[in-house]
Image: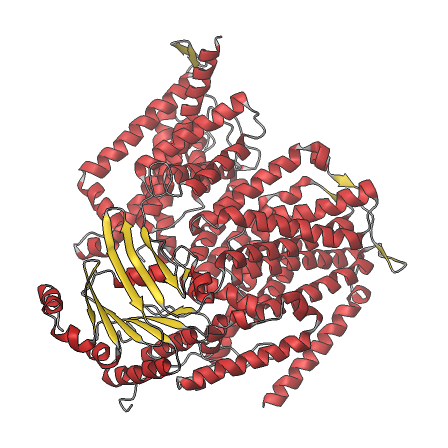
Amino acid sequence: MTSLSIFLQTLVGGIGIGSLYALVALGYSMIYRSMGLVNFAHGSIYMIGTYFGIIWYRGMVMGLQVPYPIAFVIGILLNALLGLFLERLFRPLAHLDLMLMLLGTIGLGYVLDNLAVIIWGAEGFAVKSPLPNEPIVIGGVALLPQMLLLIVVSALLMIGLNVFLARSKMGKAMRAAAQDRETASAMGIPVNTTNALVFAIGAGLAAAAGILAAPIVYVNPAMSAAVGLKGFAAFILGGAGSIPGAIVGGLVFGVLEALSAGFVSSQYTKGIAFVVMILVLMIKPAGIVGEVTVDKV
Amino acid sequence: MSLEIEHLVMRFGGVVAVNDVSLSVQPGKIHGLIGPNGSGKTTIFNVISGYYKPTSGKVTFEGKVISGLPAHQITALGFARTFQNLRLFKTMTVLDNVLVAMGHHTQTRLWQALLDPISSAREDKWLTEKAMNLLELFNIAEYARERATSLPYGHQRRVEMARALATEPKIVLFDEPAAGLNESETEQLSETLLKIRDAGITILLVEHDMRLVMGICDIVSVLDYGKKIAEGSTQAIRTDPVVIEAYLGKEEEL
Amino acid sequence: MKNRSRMLKWILLAVGALVLLAYPLIAPNRYTVHIVNMAGIWILMSLGLNLAMGYCGQINLALGAFWGVGAYTAALLSTRFGVPIWINLPLGMALAGLTGALIALPMLKVRSHYLALVTIGLAETINIIMVNETWLTEGPLGISGIPMPNLFGIAFDGAERFFYIILFFVVLGFLVARQIVNHRIGRAFIAIRDDETAARAMGVNVAFYQVLANAIAGVYCGVAGVLYAHMSTYISPDIFEFKNALFVLTMTMVGGMGSLAGSIVGGLALPLTQEWLRAIKHWQLVGFGLAIIIVVLFMPGGVVGLTQKIEQAGGIRLPWMRKPAEDKPQMEEPNVA
């Protein structure tokens, strides 16, 4: 393999994993933007969403063997319901004292993570891809079909989300409520409903990400910490609260990670990723695309 | 002892909030700064007190350049200020609010206090006495141990003033101190400001209440759209057609 | 009335002191003394966190890193060079304090949401480094054979004897914290937490005090680390893990963030509860998570805050409570000048 193709290979792998981070980061961004809430439990929501889908696919629920696409949809729906429930629970927390908000969501993360261990065990499992395992070769780059699926479906979801926010009535309502809660409310927009939808969509996207990535990465409750933290870093990297920022941040973070794993050392990837993010925060606190400020002084 | 503002320009992105303003505040005087909303008054305050670095121009105090210095250093040079929207320390008592401002008086370092708790306690007592004296001057000594934000609004204003004076300033910047006060409270405020001036402290006052301004200021500068449009005695300002135009043009009352 | 309450306070204090001093003699077995010793270590860390976060608003979750620095300083110096505990202590304190100060520096420019992430990220990075740099830390296997201290000719081997060392430092730590809180530094901390802008105007050098707050957290955790190393005689890099910081955060929140007593309450209650619920480990963590959520939603002042509220509502004064600032009901301003 030429070094260019090695580089491209790594790059594509980075985009793949970056799509995962982008979907997770979108959840953080949407919730932050509409509710001023930094949801530290989002990683756990991602993890639970993955389980919600994979358990059907693996026949872990009453022995039913559900085909992958259906398991995918079920997982998303179940997680969206969880999102609705959590929004209701955390409604009083939004826009509150920052410390309390942070701690409340950390506590929630604790609860979700350990419930997952209690219900499904800590060991986790590998998931077989529904697609064949032979890599497809495109332009000198070998790609697992599952990876291709991940990238394509993620892209479709992100495009779908943007269309929804830009064109649909509910989407516009959500954007209005995110920009100015009071005015939107005064104009008859049901802010509680839009917030609930934000949580549901965020959770749904996270589940989608997890179920798509499951055959590539190992599935276990510890995913919540690993992916959660990285998704959060991507959210900040791109510019907290910005939808395109979350996508850019996720992809950049994924590529960064892949490059450092490929060319530096896999041990330190996590550390390097963090250091880069902290540097970005110090140099340009608004992130790559720029932050959407939520709180009015 | 004078405060000099020379050709100050303050730009935020595309907006020029302060456009080449020069001002000279004489020691021991009450200098009023008035103008319609948005004319740049509070921005100037924020530059003087060290929250913004000027886009260009400079501020000097007693010959020393202070523009660009951080706020706490400017305070140490003899400045104090109050805020338009009261900024009391929410969880602290009235007394503690004042004690914070007296922090630079404390001589005892932590390690000294640990090794010699008795002299630390003595210093504490001295500080508390000083603070209480200050509170008495403002007639709020009886509330010393109450949470500052639980007091009625007028009293909170007094706490903020006491706190500002606790830094033992040479010059105090008052940002709309009469906002939200009723007539009798504004009267009391006038008297208090005059007493502060008589104690030798210079005052720079941003205010919308014209009666207060005309009543106590020695000299008034008028701003409009970030530029100084007039300056002089209260008598001169009151009848200056340019000033009246600026206010009438904004449909404000003089 | 006042005298009776004061006398009650002193009596309780005296009884408490006696019980504490006699504890190793009346404890059922060595293991329970060990548990209490560990609680003491957690209390020290919680005091540090409370000072930095409860009083100064610094969301510093890198406690594991400070703890680890203290522990590894003691471990390495004592096992490689035979350095005794009374030198390890100031060194560990200094290094951990320095770590705290250094971590604070990038945080100064970062907005508050990100503080938590930055400290978590830094702590994780330090964790990874410590695990991998075996020349420094001897890797994931850890360091064993740390000697128990030998002071004034007395060998402090065994939990019962070590108890007095821990007790000494907890009491000292509490008194120092109280001195900090009640004077200039404490007031500056609270001012910064309540209103940073106003604090600056009052002459408070915000950056300095923020760094100081983090350094203090570092120092307290550093002491805890040194003591832990000499007490357990074996340490491994899992000290640096984030879950330790989370544990300290939980106990401080539940006990009362922003109140020193809260550190004591939380630092005792949570480790003891954890021990008691040891058999059902994961449910225990679920419980902790729920505890945090409940505290956040319903009693942000923790247990101590709750007792203060009970006090105000019922008009009773529990003997250990300081006189709280009363809430004056809003009243009409008289129109007479």
Residue C38 at x, y = what percent? 70, 55
Residue drawn at x 38%, y 9% is: A139
Q: Nearer the viewer, residue B243 or B38?
A: B243
> Residue A55's x, y, as percent?
45, 32
Determine which quarter of the picture holds residue C172.
bottom right
Identify the residue at the far right of this view: C153
Q: How is the image coloured?
A: secondary structure
Query: Which residue is at the far front?
Result: B63
User: A238 and A42: which one is in front?
Assistant: A238
The N terminus of chain C sits in image quarter: bottom right
The tally of labels here is 0
Residue C51 percent coordinates (x, y): 57, 61
Name which quarter of the figure residue A71 lies in: top left
Question: What residue sits 17% from the left and 54% below the top?
Answer: A188
Answer above or below: position of B184 versus C94. Answer: below
Is residue C91 visible to the viewer in this orientation of the structure?
A: yes
B236, above or below C36, in the image = below
Name the residue: 49% across, 59% down: C206
Choose between C323 and B142: the one closer to the eye.
Answer: B142
* Vertical position of residue C303 compared to residue C290: above or below: below
Q: Nearer the viewer, residue B65 or B155?
A: B65
Residue at figure coordinates x 37%, y 81% from the top left = B196
* Quadrant containing the C terminus of chain C in the rendered view: bottom left
Q: Is residue A7 left or right of residue B178?
A: right
Q: Does residue C31 appear to the left or right of C294 in the view shown?
A: right
The answer to whether A198 appears left or right of A253 in the picture is left
Is residue A75 visible to us here? no
Coordinates of residue A210 in the picture (x, y in percent): 42, 32
Q: Quadrant of residue B116?
A: bottom right
B92 over A133 or under it: above or below: below
